[in-house]
Amino acid sequence: MKKRSVVLSIRFLFVLSLTCGCTATAQQTTAAVQQQAPSVSISENVPNPMRDGVILMANVFRPEAEGTYPVIVIRTPYGKGDANNDDGKYFASNEYVYIVQDCRGRGSSGGKWYPGINERKDGLDTHQWILAQPWCNGSIGTLGGSYVGYTQWITAPDAGDYLKAMFTVVPLFDWYKDTSYIGGALNHAQMMDWGTGMAIPPEGQSGIDWKKWNKKKVIWHLPLSTWDEMIGFEVAYLRDWIAHPEYDSYWKQYRMTDSLDKVKAPNITISGWYDIFVSQAFENISRLKKESTAPQYVVVGPWPHGAKTKVGEIDFGKEAEFNKRYVQSNWFDHWLKGKDTDIDIWPPLRIFVMGTNKWRNEYEWPLARTKFTPYYFHSTGNANTANGNGTLSTVKPADQPADKYVYDPADPVPTHGGCNLTIPAGPFDQANIEKRSDVLVYTSDVLDADLEVTGPVKVILYAASSATDTDFTGKLVDVYPDGRAMNICDGIIRARYRNEGKAMLIGAGKIYRYEIDLWPTSNVFLKGHRIRVEISSSNFPRFDRNPNTGHTFGADAELVKAKQNVYHDKQHLSHILLPIIP
């Protein structure tokens, strides 16, 4: 027992260092580096030749002393910066070679920019160039977040034993399911807004009249297939994304998740409950644990697309801080230099439990002790708005009338928080959303004890529509004693993609069973709070508006109202399935 207590104490101390910043330790380390650090050699715009003759440019930070060193490489479309790169100087001062490269067609690199398509070959060619350099000792680690996480993952299955470690922050794994189409609906704000921003050259170089540029107007543009007309020039990838609403050979060229068994490099993934890629992070890391022998670690905070303590309208406090550099240093020192940095006692899963705002170690996903519990929808046919009579409980409904609302794509329910990139992300009070008659609201009784929900969340919905295609959305909400209704997680399902296969329109007026993936979360609904579920048919501009016509996706500028019925009776047990942790 004494030995076990010592191990647990060490683990506890490590966890504190992992999540709470380790300010003193970090300051001491920085001071030591400044006193003893070797001189750093910095070379800007070093040419990296690709197999097709295109030259990519990189900045190289390395120790000035002769010798060979492990290499950390970052491949980014967001600009490699210049010699004043603190991370480059830091790692070079700690006897690494640090390389940051502009992706093809971005920054100083040659070639044509087209997101995702070239990253596999270019990444592998970059690795081979590095391995041929006299300062490389044969070991490579990769680093970076978001798209830069994708540039790591897309090469991982084909990389040799030289790839020793990956450090991925809020990484993009799967272009189709991660970022393009969620539940069959276009991830509108992310794809079209981010895609447009990445297509437009700097001001003064594009010919665009920036004084006339109106982002709010552009976001409403239809048909989606001609989105680029709003910016004044054709963008091939924007048109291609709209032309391929289903997973096909186009998306397959982006995909690495069919080859997870080939991944040999240890990986740590940093994500957040309000991050745009958190769902696929859990899905793919869970698969990696089964299909790959490489060690996998996951840290998930209460964050959006980047670690911060204030998220949306909630300040999660000092507990939510994360000292990324400290963890990176320990990670790479272990895998690239063979140092003992206590990684052997790192928990495979480290999660921040919202509500109580505490970190916790876990060892599988979903958690083995989870009790998946249905909370059923109830009403007398008037669950519209938070002032309606919709309720939520573990008791199955008897015969009850359906709830009804009209979904008008010309007046969609606005996005207010959630897992977003280019619009505000995180938890926000949904009070104004819940005043709308096209939002059904089901609320539990006041909780007499804390209730933890940790794991994947989904809604099972029985619904009918007057349209031959439409959308249904779900949202889990934490209602505070003062009346604030803070969104926890949400999702959408496009009716024609209800079976996760090829598109199949629905019959008008026919009842169908829908599963709405609300994505994973971890939140304690505290004593005195209430659990709430919102059901509607739009969440714009996070997701595109379904025009309700059933026409070819992206080609439609016509908008039609849809009459929606949501059923909750003995034959149609509409509910939310909550992963309750005893």
Image (cartoon, grey):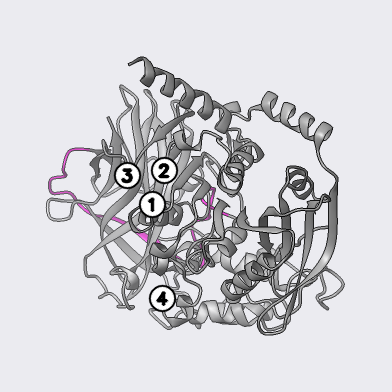
Asked if disc 3 and disc 2 are in contact, CB closer than 8 Å, the reply is no
Tell us which disc is closer to us: 3 or 4.
3
Q: Which residue is mark 1?
A: 518
- Residue 417 on image: x %, y %: 54, 48
In 3D space, how far apart are the residues under numbered discs 4 and 1 (Cα atoms)? 21 Å
For the C terminus, the quadrant is top left
- Main SS of the magenta part reads loop
Q: Range of the magenta residues?
A: 394-420
In 3D space, how far apart are the residues under numbered discs 3 and 2 (Cα atoms)? 11 Å
Instruction: Evaluate whether residue 437 shows in this view.
Output: no
Q: Which residue is mark 2?
A: 521
Q: Which residue is mark 4?
A: 247
Say which amino acid is labelled 1: Leu
Residue visible at 87% across and 72% down in the picture: 204
In 3D space, how far apart are the residues under numbered discs 1 and 3 (Cα atoms)? 15 Å
Disc with the residue nearer the chain's start (4 vs 1): 4
In 3D space, how far apart are the residues under numbered discs 1 and 2 (Cα atoms)? 9 Å
Tell us which disc is closer to us: 1 or 2.
2
Residue visible at 58% across and 37% down in the picture: 313
Q: Which residue is mark 3?
A: 366
In 3D space, how far apart are the residues under numbered discs 3 and 4 (Cα atoms)? 26 Å
Q: Residues within 10 Å of mark 4 (few under 14, many from 20)?
A: some
Asked if disc 2 and disc 4 are in contact, CB closer than 8 Å, the reply is no
